[in-house]
Image: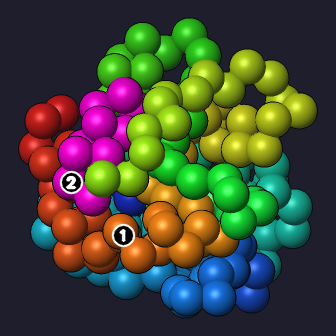
């Protein structure tokens, strides 16, 4: 481990996550973002040979176990009216709440994307729970915008997003 922070690109190359009519898939876009952060964080990709979400998250937790902070990069998709930024954290992790809150504030201030706020992950029925629960360090799922929202996509700027993540990491 060379750094205190791990960046995990959500999904994998054969199951690329959310899609947008205006942008590359979640995995493709966030892979580009991650490459821009290799000087401040260790970058990880899920192994597509490991079947099942929870199994992949357990394997990733082992790979990132020495990192103090682990961020998984995503973007949201839903109906065209859904918009905004949110970050998901393990419900009892007060430090995770603070970092998730700061992330949402930075995205909102930098790109004027609606702040949907930090959201606690409470139980295993919630999508993403295994990531925030299984990871040793403070784990947060970062969702800066909705790829299905034309308004969010118009406001999203990859270079600004990389700067947001650099600012977030620098503040840890």
Where is residue 71 shown, x and y percent of the image? 43, 49
Q: Is residue 172 above or below residue 166?
A: above
The residue located at (87%, 61%) in the rendering is 52
Of the pair 47 and 147, the residue shown nearer to us: 147
Q: Quadrant of the C terminus?
A: top left
Name the residue tied to disc 1.
156
Q: Is residue 66 visible?
A: no
Q: Of the residues under marks 1 and 2, which one precedes in the sequence?
A: 2
The residue located at (73%, 19%) in the rendering is 122
Query: Does residue 57 appear left or right of residue 154 in this picture?
Result: right
Magenta residues (range): 100-111
Gap between marks 1 and 2 measured at Cα? 9 Å
Magenta span contains residue 133? no
Where is residue 40 shown, x and y percent of the image? 16, 60
Q: Quadrant of the N terminus?
A: bottom left
Q: Main secondary structure of the magenta part?
A: helix
Query: Does residue 100 appear left or right of residue 107 in this picture?
Result: right
Q: Is residue 144 above or below residue 126?
A: below
Name the residue tied to disc 2.
110
């Amino acid at each position: 481990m060379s750094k205190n922070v791990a960046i995990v690109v959500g999904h994998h190359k054969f199951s690329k996550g959310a899609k947008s009519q205006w942008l590359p898939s979640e995995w493709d876009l966030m892979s580009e973002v991650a490459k821009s952060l290799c000087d401040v964080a260790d970058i990880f990709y899920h192994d597509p040979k490991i079947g099942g979400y929870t199994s992949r998250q357990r394997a990733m937790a082992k790979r990132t176990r020495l990192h103090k902070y682990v961020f998984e990069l995503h973007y949201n998709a839903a109906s065209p009216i859904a918009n905004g930024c949110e970050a998901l954290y393990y419900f009892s992790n007060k430090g995770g709440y603070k970092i998730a809150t700061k992330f949402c504030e930075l995205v909102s201030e930098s790109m004027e994307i609606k702040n949907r706020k930090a959201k606690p992950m409470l139980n295993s029925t919630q999508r993403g729970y295994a990531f925030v629960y299984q990871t040793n360090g403070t784990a947060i799922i970062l969702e800066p915008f909705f790829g299905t929202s034309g308004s969010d996509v118009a406001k999203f700027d990859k270079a600004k997003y990389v700067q947001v993540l650099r600012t977030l990491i620098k503040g840890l």
